Image (cartoon, rainbow, N blue to C red):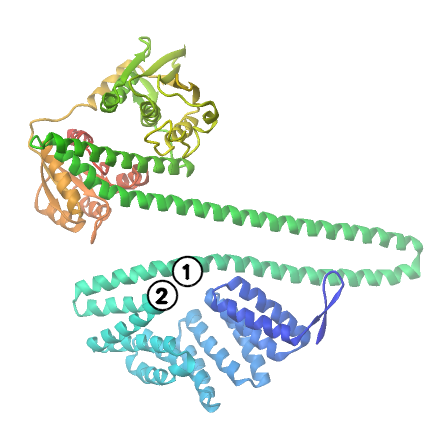
Amino acid sequence: MSLNTHKNGQPTQIANDSVDVLIKKSIDLFYGYKIKESLDAAIKAVDYAHQLDNINFKYRAHYVIASNFEVIEDYKNAKNHYQQALKLAEENKDSIFIIRSLNGLGNVHIELDNDINNSVSYYNKALALAKVAKIRKEQFGPVLNLGWTYIDHDKYTMALPYLLEAMDLADDWGGIYATNNVKYLLGRYYSGTGNHKKANKLFNEVIRVAEEKQALSILTDTYQAKSNLFEKIDETDSALHSIKKYLFYKNKLFDEEKLKQVEIAKVNFSIDEYQRELKSIQKEKQYLAKIARNNIAITITSISLILLLVVLFFFYRGYRSKQKLNKALKEKNEELLEAKTEAEKLTSMKSQFISTVSHELRTPLYGVVGITTLLMEDNDITTRHKKLLNSLKFSGDYLLDLINKVLKISKIEAENEKLTKTPTNLLQLSQNLLHSFDYQAKNKNNELILDVQNELPEILLVDSLKLSEVLINLIGNSSKFTENGKIWLRIKINSIEDDEIQVRFEVEDNGLGIPEDKKEFVFEKFSQIGREFNKLEGTGLGLSIVKNLLEMMDSEIYLDSKEGRGTKFYFDLKLEIIDEKNDHELKLNGQRETNVYRKILVAEDNKINQIVTKNLLDLIGYDCIIVENGFNALQMVKKESFDLILMDLNMPYLNGAEATKRIRKFDKTTPIVALTASELSEVQEECMAIGMNDVINKPLNKNDLRDIISKNLSK
């Protein structure tokens, strides 16, 4: 047992048992992939081992440190610690750790200099020593590594004896896991020597066990090897299946690799801190030794120098206190930075999750809404069935609206929303918005009233899409709470100065109104005023979106409401006035081509989407040819001419983006419009960069599809 003095000056005892526990703990953490914690424990073990001067603890701790460095691919440090472990183990004549250190040096040498001769030399030394010592368990590592090295370098004849020997030793080392590694290498041997049937059988045995144990690394390697095997014998379908499984497990393994990268960053920081601490301790010892020498001189010379020493002592204490404070502050800052990074990571994951879910939901909705729309166009449908179809379409539209609102909230929170101002006719915009609520108003016996001042300039610069979202949410909110009443949309002029105008927008109804105790909550996400006031309830997202969008536009939403007397929402916007001569360009955008035969290529893999898109194109007067993937689209464009291409982005074999890149190599002019269930803002920039002309969201509707085709054909 030894004494260890802490910084506070109090001695503590270091027991042999505690060092042994530290080393075992470090090994357990290593196998649990907690590299930082494993290294911390091993570094402490080395420190204590040197204080105890226990050679056994020294080389065991150095070996664990080397293993950690090997995992995080710091092969230079791994080599240094393996060499220290080897030297100490040889001094203590510990055969097991001599063998393991030699085996470790074989692993790092092939990574450092890519020279198999050095690695093979270390493996052979380890194997020879294990055989002389008659330790079967320690023979497995070098034997397996020799076979693996020769397989990796296509030296199959040299590899086979070692693989057969490894199979015989596998039970002594690690049972089923060790056996699985050997079978994987034997499969690669038979694949490389032409015995494809036997190779496939071995790969299948490995996969069965590895999938049961969820051993991702060996699964990834085995499916990759299996894909290479099928590619050799021209079994393309099987090769494709294996490469898909390889990618699946590679992605799962990638998640573990991300954890590993995080640990690498932590380890680098921890090691730097440890090194700095050692230097600080050394400086402190030197400084204290200097003070001791000065004390002797002070005693001999004069009282004045003693006073100077006192001053220096207090200065030193202040300096140390400041150092400790700075260190504590630095640690807190690093904790905050780590928390910030984690929060940003979670936000990114949430955004990606919502985007993925929206795509998966929008794709089947395309079929629901599209087929319902097509059936409603059929004059042979009975009145009873039309009512059912109306209900079905209402449900589909409501679900789509919910998905879009959740996405909108997510985009605003992730700060992905940006203002895009365009010249806009507010009168036409308002008329179109109210017209879209005609059907809903008739169902609830409501009257829609538009009140716009005559002095309002014709064209103003505004983000028309975001303004439309605000007004649609406000009018929809009024419609939800009003029956047998009136809904007003008013646009008033507050002030005009030079080329700038301040406009007030009001949406008012004479419906139920909002209770006083609910007013402060209506703009919060998922807030609802209760079942007794709202039969439909809704999502509670609309007014939250309104508030956030207006904040982006440097405005604020106001509420004036009394229960039983109706509700008024209003907000002000400062807008730039556009010269009326620019209006000509706006009107040209609405022109459409008619009475001209056009042939359109549709690339879409979903069968239901194919049916819906074809019928929509028939309704608006276009002929089309449908293909199921990007590869077939590429071949079709090479054979025939098309006036326009509708290209789905997510397809098997060759996706829409890659197909477009290849088409643009020989066809620069045919308009290509992307079909996507993703948010437009997430894919639009990439689509334009690769040569697409436009993007449209699924599910499609007849009018939007007709407009985007006409716009691109007119160019």
Residue 696 image position (x, y, % from top left): 23, 36
Residue 256 numbered mark, or none: 1
Establish if 259 lies above or below 603: below
Q: Quadrant for residue 284, please give it.
A: bottom right
Name the disc covering residue 279, or none. Answer: none
Whether residue 76 appears in this view of the structure is no
> Label 2 sits on what residue type?
Leu
Q: Which residue is mark 2?
A: 216
Q: Name the spot of residue 107 as percent of width and height, x first.
A: 44, 74
Q: Secondary structure at mark 1?
A: helix
Q: State the quadrant of the N terminus.
A: bottom right
In the foreground, 568 or 251: 568
- Report the residue at 32% width, 81% height from top: 159
Q: Residues within 10 Å of mark 1 (few under 14, many from 20)?
A: few
Q: For the image shown, how many numbered marks are present on the structure?
A: 2
Query: In terms of depth relative to the viewer, which is nearer, 536 or 154?
Result: 536
Q: Is residue 387 left or right of residue 525?
A: left
Q: Eyeballing the image, is 612 above or below 330?
A: above
Q: Position of residue 487 (x, y in %)?
A: 31, 17
Q: Judge left or right: residue 157 versus residue 342.
A: left
In the image, taking residue 57 as reference, residue 587 lies left or right, namely: left
The residue located at (33%, 11%) in the rendering is 456
Quarter of the image that includes the C terminus:
top left
